[in-house]
Image (cartoon, rainbow, N blue to C red):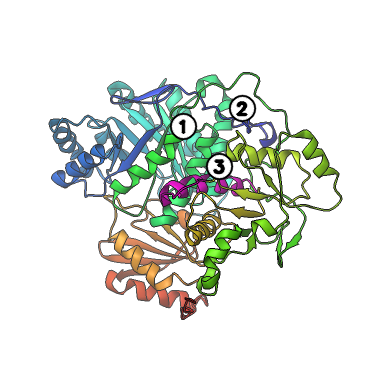
Amino acid sequence: MNSPASLRYCPDLLHYARRLTREVMVGNVGIGAHHPIRVQSMITSDTRDTPASVKQVLDLAEAGCEIVRITAQTRIYAANLENIAREVRAAGCQVPLVADIHFKPDAAMEAAKWVEKVRVNPGNYVDKKKFEVREYSDAEYEEELERIRAEFTPLVHLCKDLGRAMRIGTNHGSLSDRIMNRYGDTPLGMVESAFEFARIARENDYHHFVFSMKASNPKVMIEAYRLLVARLEAEGADWNYPIHLGVTEAGDGEDGRIKSAIGIGSLLADGIGDTIRVSLTEDAIHEIPVAKKITAPYHNLPSEHPTGAVTELVPSYDPFSYQRRDSSVMTILGHELGGDKTVRVFTTQDRWNAIAHKISGMGDFKPEIILEKSGVLEIDPRDEAAVSALNDSVDPKLVTVKDGLDLEVIHAFRRLAFVVDPKHPILLKDTLSPPAGDTDFIEALLPAAQNIGSLLCDGIGDAILVRGEKAPGQSLRLAYNILQGTGTRIFKTDYVACPSCGRTLFNLQSTTQKIRAATGHLKGVRIAIMGCIVNGPGEMADADFGYVGGAPNKINLYVGKTAVKFNIPEAEAVERLIDLIREHGKWVDAPVPEPAIA
């Protein structure tokens, strides 16, 4: 395998060019090549309920969803896809349907008869989740691959014969024992898991597939997709398969949208991604406008790299492994920043003035440093004289990119990080062209999360400033939530909450809100809320506690990856979760909020 140093996931980190792939047709919808980035979602109804499933498919298609996924847990569920597909087509809707398969090869074989695409998860398509700790010898490893080949090849042949597409979709939380014990719970393990299945497909001259590398942690997700694309490039020109992007278990509300924009948006900005699904713990219909807004900026951008634009600047970071940029520590207006210090939140003088009377009641969303009093140096990173003068200075200086430049935000700050001496801390901005008038919050949220979040995930940035949202309080909340979403600065409870689907064993939306209401004050505690265990305990790898559907109306509670309480009645489960948090010394009572000063 190539070393990370020799791998490249995009031609130029400082200019946009969409990765050009082969075309994969899903029914009448093309993915990759010169097609626009496609928007997908997934219905939440029971697949055995034909009228409810058909209605949700039609509603999603009406909202602009271009590909609709349906779970098929068993062969019985998969068989009803025939009825769903017939009724959807009878209604005049041609949106392609995808069967979501976990664990059951016979369900995949049945589903492929009726839908245009089948999604398989290499981590659990053949493997049961044992999580045994053992070493595989080369012979034992090869024996496992032969077992997979025997189970997977019939589906490859069927899809090839029927003209069906496939997604080989790895999930961070459901890697097989074999992969876990050889590669660990890593982006490399995720890529190798998918490659095992892709090689079998290619051995049978089947190329009608796309890849995905989903994770609930945006940093892991970004690294895994970058490594996947770099490995595909290294394998050769005919490994140019399209990419499906998504952040699993992103959650709901503002947090779910921020995590999705960080993970999906940062990859799209580098030209990676041909179809996306935004996974929100909300009605699926709400995923579509978010996905459309995330993809909109890339519909009219060039697919080819601009002639002569490849930049020879040396990157200041390893794109396949997170490490924070090594800047010097400075103290500005009483706050330390840079080095390993807290990433600070800036605001402007006029916004400070607007909220000064109520700062004491703003809790964790307080502004820390005023831009105009910070002494920050604004430069054009292409200005060699300005860069040289800065680098000649003995003392570290806080630096940012000058407003009004004809550069994309991510590219501008990467260039700044590449050319200035590492000792100089960097202030990130969500936009180089602050809006003059009022702004729509979601219109400000998505680009801010993408631009600042992407840079933070690359280890760039010692302070941040959000200006795309005009309202002072909301801009500060957005800044802090971006820091939370990237794992840069944890100031509240973090939730890993999956979207609903036909496998869900309880009402995810109401339960998530109930758990949030009870635990939202626990700073730094991470709670996973999973409708079922399809994605495996590994998706809760970073979570302190897990609330997981074990059977209809029965909940299993986890500490880390380990189930410790079983078959708890749903009505009691939130209180039992609180008891479990207490048992492990992580519970504190919610503070009484300070009254805001009028």
Characterize the local packing of mark 1: few (<14), some (14-19) or many (20 or more) Cα atoms within 10 angstroms: some
Task: Quote the CA–CA distance across marks 2 and 3.
Answer: 27 Å
Please state which amino acid type lies under the numbered disc 3: Ser
Residue 367: where, in percent of width, then height? 58, 64
> Taken as a whole, is the magenta stretch helix, strand or loop?
helix
247 left or right of 108? right
Check if residue 93 falls in the magenta segment.
no
Q: Residue at x 58, y 36 (%)?
A: 408
Q: Where is residue 51 in the image (x, y as percent from the top left)?
A: 13, 44
**Span highlighted in magenta in the image:** 435-459
- Residue 284 at what x, y percent from top left? 30, 48
Residue at left offset 85%, top offset 47%: 393
Which one is closest to the eye, mark 2 or mark 3?
Answer: 3
Q: Please, what is the three-letter code of the amino acid marked with disc 2?
A: Pro
Q: In this view, does 157 lie above or below 564?
A: above
Return the residue at label 2. Answer: 11
Q: Determine if the magenta segment contains residue 458.
A: yes
The quarter holding residue 35 reads top left
Tell me the CA gap for discs 3 and 1: 19 Å
Disc 3 packing (10 Å; few <14; some 14–19; many ≥20): some
Front in this rendered view, residue 281 or 440: 440
Look at the numbered disc 3 and give the secondary structure of its residue. loop
Which residue does the numbered mark 1 point to in the structure image? Answer: 298
Q: How many marks?
A: 3
Q: Which mark is residue 433?
A: 3
Measured Cα–Cα span from mark 1 to mark 2: 17 Å
